[in-house]
Image (spheres, helix red, strand yellow):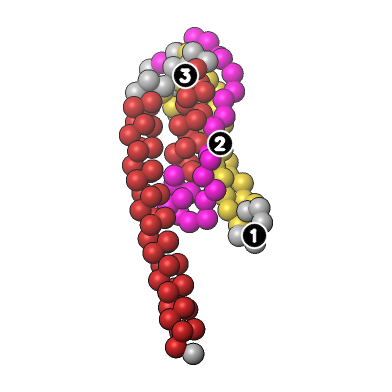
Amino acid sequence: MEFASLLIFSFFVLIVWSQISSKKKAKERSTNMDEMLNQLRNEVLSISGSSIPGKEVKKIIGMVRGVSDTQASRKEEFELAEKEALYKMLMEAKSLGANAVIDIKLNTGTYERQGSKWQVSQAVYNGTAVEV
């Protein structure tokens, strides 16, 4: 009986430690993503509207999309997923020669994680790459 109690307690400690470790890693990834995203935003303007105040669209390049790698089931993970998707979209625009993205929209999809009953979300950003 004592062994079973010790085993259950050890399992509980392992779960708590895993959650703390996961949150810490997500925070570190989020901080790194913030730095990369801020640097990229200096090169590629981004706006949810169809025009950029004080700028004229010279060329429409086309639709761009960014899909997160993170499968989010918690708030911290979803914030990271949003940043990943935005970063990927802006990188795609930059690789196509755009210096701005207009009409940006965030979409989310929720689905069941393969092999489990857990619901997770994924972030997807869409926009129009342009040259201003």
Coordinates of residue 124 in the picture (x, y in percent): 56, 38
Coordinates of residue 43 in the picture (x, y in percent): 37, 20
Up the image or down, 120 lies above or below 1; here it is above
Nearest to N terminus: mark 3 or mark 1: 3
| Callout 1: SS | loop
Amino acid on which the number 3 mark rests in the picture: Lys
The numbered disc on residue 5 is none
Q: Residue at x 35, y 53 (%)?
A: 24
Which residue was labeled with disc 1?
Answer: 116
Could you say which is closer to the camera, residue 18 or residue 97? 18
| Callout 2: SS | strand
Q: Residue at x 63, y 53 (%)?
A: 113
The answer to whether one can see residue 27 in this image is yes
Q: Does residue 64 appear to the left or right of 75 in the view shown?
A: right
Which residue was labeled with disc 3?
Answer: 94
Nearest to N terminus: mark 3 or mark 2: 2
Q: Does residue 27 appear to the left or right of 104 in the view shown?
A: left
Q: Is residue 103 magenta?
A: no
Which residue was labeled with disc 2?
Answer: 67
Q: CA distance from mark 3 to mark 2?
A: 16 Å
Q: CA distance from mark 1 to mark 2?
A: 22 Å
Looking at the rendering, the stretch of residues picked out in magenta corresponds to 55-80
Instruction: Please state which of the two labelled residues, at mark 3 or mark 1, is closer to the viewer.
Output: 1
Q: Residue furthest top?
A: 58
Quarter where residue 46 is shown:
top left
